[in-house]
Amino acid sequence: MFQDIRFAIRSAFRNPALTSVIVISLALGIGANTTIFTLINAVFLRPLPVTDPARLAQVFTVMPKSAAYQSLSLANYRDFRDNVTEFSGLAAYQFIGANLVGGTEPVTIGGQLVTGNYFQVLGVDAALGRTIVPEEDLTLGSSPVRRQKILSSAPV
């Protein structure tokens, strides 16, 4: 085995162009493979960090003439939540952009407007502080929950 290793090293020094092409090809192949696996693992293989991800469903309305999916209005959400018994829970969310202030410049960040039972339906707890309780969204805009001060830069 040692003779084979010495022979391979001597051959590599005899033809450095071929050796560099082989090393670069291996490095690119390993790097691409690692990147693709990391992406697939993050998107498809790792389960969602909720209590029972297999039981989650997303509810849409369909426009009759265009067959396009649309999100539910707040009134339709409340009707579904109060009258449909096939679901163990129903929560609503909407993506928004928000301005984060407190530093030297405001920064636009992504966020979500969620119903009071959002965390309860997903079965997750807050990493810091408390979650929204269902009583806080009985009236629109009645009691917004805001974090007044960022306590840590660690991801939550």
Image (spheres, grey):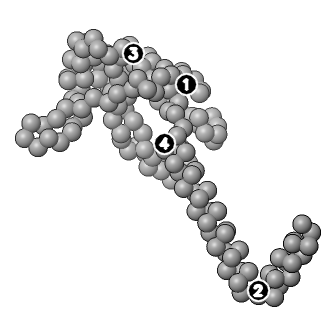
Q: Position of residue 31 (x, y in %)?
A: 63, 63
Return the mark for residue 126.
1
- Measure the alpha-carbon separation of dots 1 and 2: 57 Å
Helix, strand or loop under label 1: loop
User: Which residue is tagged 3?
Assistant: 134
Count of number-bearing discs: 4
Circles 2 and 3, Cβ within 8 Å, touching? The answer is no
- Measure the alpha-carbon separation of dots 1 and 4: 24 Å
Q: Residues within 10 Å of mark 3 (few under 14, many from 20)?
A: few
Q: Amino acid at mark 2?
A: Pro
Earlier in the chain: of badge 3 and badge 1, it is 1
Residue lying at 24% horizontally and 18% vertically, measured from the top left:
80
Circles 4 and 2, Cβ within 8 Å, touching? The answer is no
Helix, strand or loop under label 3: helix
Return the mark for residue 16.
2
Residue lying at 64% horizontally and 73% vertically, measured from the top left:
25
- Measure the alpha-carbon separation of dots 4 and 3: 31 Å
Residue lying at 76% horizontally and 87% vertically, measured from the top left:
15
- Measure the alpha-carbon separation of dots 4 and 2: 41 Å
Determine the image quadrant of residue 143.
Answer: top left
Q: Amino acid at mark 4?
A: Phe
Q: Report the mark closest to the observer, 4 or 2.
A: 2
Assign the C terminus to one quadrant of the image. top right
Assign the N terminus to one quadrant of the image. bottom right
User: Which residue is tagged 4?
Assistant: 44
Determine the image quadrant of residue 12.
Answer: bottom right
Q: Position of residue 84 (x, y in %)?
A: 24, 14
Q: Amino acid at mark 3?
A: Pro
Q: Position of residue 119 (x, y in %)?
A: 45, 22
Q: Amino acid at mark 1?
A: Ala
